[in-house]
Amino acid sequence: MKNSIFTGALIALAFGSCGESEPTGALPKTSEDSFSYAVGVNIGQNLKIKGLDKISISGFVKGLRDGMALDSGFALTEDQMARIQPDYVAAVQAEKMKGIQAETKTKLEEISKKKGVTALPSNAYYEVVEAGSGNAPNSYDTIVCRFLMKDASGKVLIDNMSSEQPFRGELAGLRLAPLEEAFQKTLNKGKFNLYISNELHPRLVDPQGDFKNRYGISVFEVTLLDVIPGVAPKP
């Protein structure tokens, strides 16, 4: 089936030797056990990325066994199976999306009410952590900064704070309106937090990554280390 969310060969390799008497959740003991466990984790992670957090184990195992034992005569036709998988995933994702969007809206409303937080034109929220001095960068200036990028739960997605070198680049080259707007409000040596809706700015997330992140929040914690003047564009 072209539309299968799994690769048939992968599943066959993962479960080709599973036996009815083998206890569920047994720790890997042999190299075959370890391989099968690793592939099982991969399948589980792929389900999770798509927003699926449960599956009928009995239905899955029956389908697996039928697929390995039969060439035809399945409980569902090929057309039904090809249609059911994307339709089911889309329905689950649509329901989850509503919940995540509601959580994101509530979270952003709470953030907007915090002292020192202001809304940006791009509908992100900017929070001054430490005021700087000197000039704020223009779009054509080069910025040097340290930053953390987190999700709404506080999980660190990108850590430049501990990198060998700080980030350095032309402000306009960021190509992300909330960040450009935030930097232009920040004086040199200043620190700020930035809260962005991923749904409004999808460049922040991998479209093939975790489903929840597509509708969640990205949080940036930034320290502006230096502003290197650039050349203003000609009128």
Image (cartoon, helix red, strand yellow):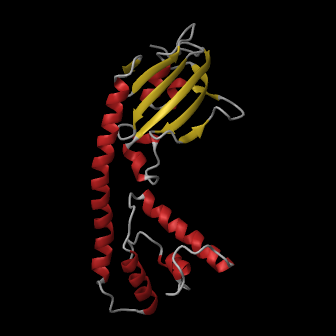
Residue 85 found in image quarter: bottom left
In the image, 138 versus 18, the foreground residue is 18
Q: Is residue 118 visible in this depiction of the protein?
A: yes
In the image, 131 versus 21, the foreground residue is 21
Relative vertical location of residue 11 with respect to residue 129 in this rendering, above or below: below
Could you tell me which residue is drawn at 29 percent across and 42 percent down? 102
Q: Is residue 122 visible in this depiction of the protein?
A: no
Q: Position of residue 209 (x, y in %)?
A: 47, 52
Q: Quadrant of the C terminus?
A: top left
Q: Position of residue 143 (x, y in %)?
A: 59, 22
In the image, 107 versus 123, the foreground residue is 107
Relative vertical location of residue 7 with respect to residue 181 in this rendering, above or below: below
Report the number of numbered marks: 0
Residue 65 found in image quarter: bottom left
Relative vertical location of residue 117 with respect to residue 197 in this rendering, above or below: above
Q: Position of residue 191 (x, y in %)?
A: 55, 19
Could you tell me which residue is drawn at 35 percent across and 34 percent down? 107
Relative vertical location of residue 92 with respect to residue 224 in this rendering, above or below: below
Q: Residue furthest top?
A: 134
Q: Position of residue 224 (x, y in %)?
A: 59, 20
In the image, 197 versus 82, the foreground residue is 197
Q: Is residue 132 left or right of residue 30?
A: left
Could you tell me which residue is drawn at 46 percent across and 44 percent down? 205
Could you tell me which residue is drawn at 45 percent across and 54 percent down? 208
Q: Quadrant of the N terminus?
A: bottom left
Q: Residue furthest right?
A: 164
